[in-house]
Image (spheres, helix red, strand yellow):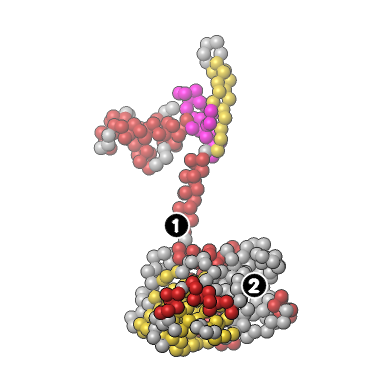
Amino acid sequence: MEIAKLLEYALTDAQKRNIQGVIDHGSVTKAAEALGLNHSTVSRSVKAARIAAAKVGDAPEAGLTHKAPAGFSIDRVSSFLDDEGKISRQWVIANRDKENQFNMMMEAWQEVCSALPRVEITEPPKEVLEDLLCDYTIGDNHTGMFAVAKEAGDDWNLEKSVDILRKGMNHLVAHAPAAKTAYILDVGDFFHSDNQNNVTNHSGNPLDVDGRYAQILSAGIDCLCTMIMLALQKHEKVIYRSVIGNHNEHSAVMINLAIKMRFHDEPRLEVLDNPNMFNYYQFGINLLADTHGHTTKADNLPMIMAVDVPQMWAETTNRVWRTGHVHHLSQKEYAGCNVITYRTLAPKDAWHSASGYRSNRDMRCTVYHKERGTVGMNIVNPTMLGY
């Protein structure tokens, strides 16, 4: 094979440079001298290109003249020789080129990664209150739910699902104290459906969904990123966690990982990506726990907390479970801790409407002090947001 044709099979920029040197200077020795390289380095580049060419059947000097289709490489060749020792017939067996496929896949991923949006680092606020934490609790948002007013009471779609949440977060951040720490907690069921089949995972109940699944995922994650950016402008440290619910067993795990990757270079954001159904965070005398609420009854939660984190239990006096699932507000004080279920900004779908659910809607920011426990709360409801 002519040396110029080997450029087609060079696998790296260095190989292309070395082979081009051989073409320009007429030999490996002269090319190595001109490029300031060892003779063996240039020779290896030529050899590697010849091997790559042979793999696809383009090596006439070896009797290979049947080039394999794109994406395939020569596995073996059988030749029938005539009485004079010349090839009269030839059988070429080609298989998919796994190495080439891998390289193509890596190139595709590099292109995808280069196009991913990068979150710019946000400047921290100049003054914060060290002893305060603002807990922004997202109730079951059911992003992507579809509803018709005549049937369910409200017209609802994907656009409204994320719009009301952005506006709610903007209002709460604007009215929150400049606490050093913010905790954005999604108590589960952030997405209405967990896959493109649009049914619940366990019972298989059909779900009314607006949009394709990929479209819903993209809109929901963009919304959460906006909420985190708002919090980073007000608070020095931001914690985020998405809880596993009965509507989003898989996507809740994905959300935590997506947020963690999106804000990979943001040192002021901590993503709690623990896939456990129960999670705990200590802030001074406050023990903040979370679970969606679909795997156990509220009466069991105080003992679960005491058994799971006995050291945290001993060091705290204001212990709070934050849950969702039922879409209505309730707070029950047990011996040792409170269990709170939160409302949602989302309206009812057709099933909940027909089943008689009539809860009010809101989103809350609860303020905790390291030494004094719960010290404040801000509430926003749909009418305050134009809904």
Identify the residue shown where x is 42% and y is 75%: 311
Height in image: 380 above or below 236? below
Image quarter where the N terminus lies is top left
Structural distance between the alpha carbons of marks 1 and 2: 32 Å
Residue bearing the label numbered 2: 145
Residue bearing the label numbered 1: 114
At mark 1, the secondary structure is helix
Identify the residue shown where x is 56% and y is 27%: 92
Residue 37: give x, y in percent of width and height.
27, 36
Q: Residues within 10 Å of mark 1 (few under 14, many from 20)?
A: few
Segment colored magenta: 55-76
Quadrant assignment, res 87? top right
Quadrant assignment, res 251? bottom right
What's the residue type where badge 2 is placed?
Met
Of marks 1 and 2, which one's residue comes earlier in the chain?
A: 1
Asked if residue 75 lies in the magenta stretch, the reply is yes
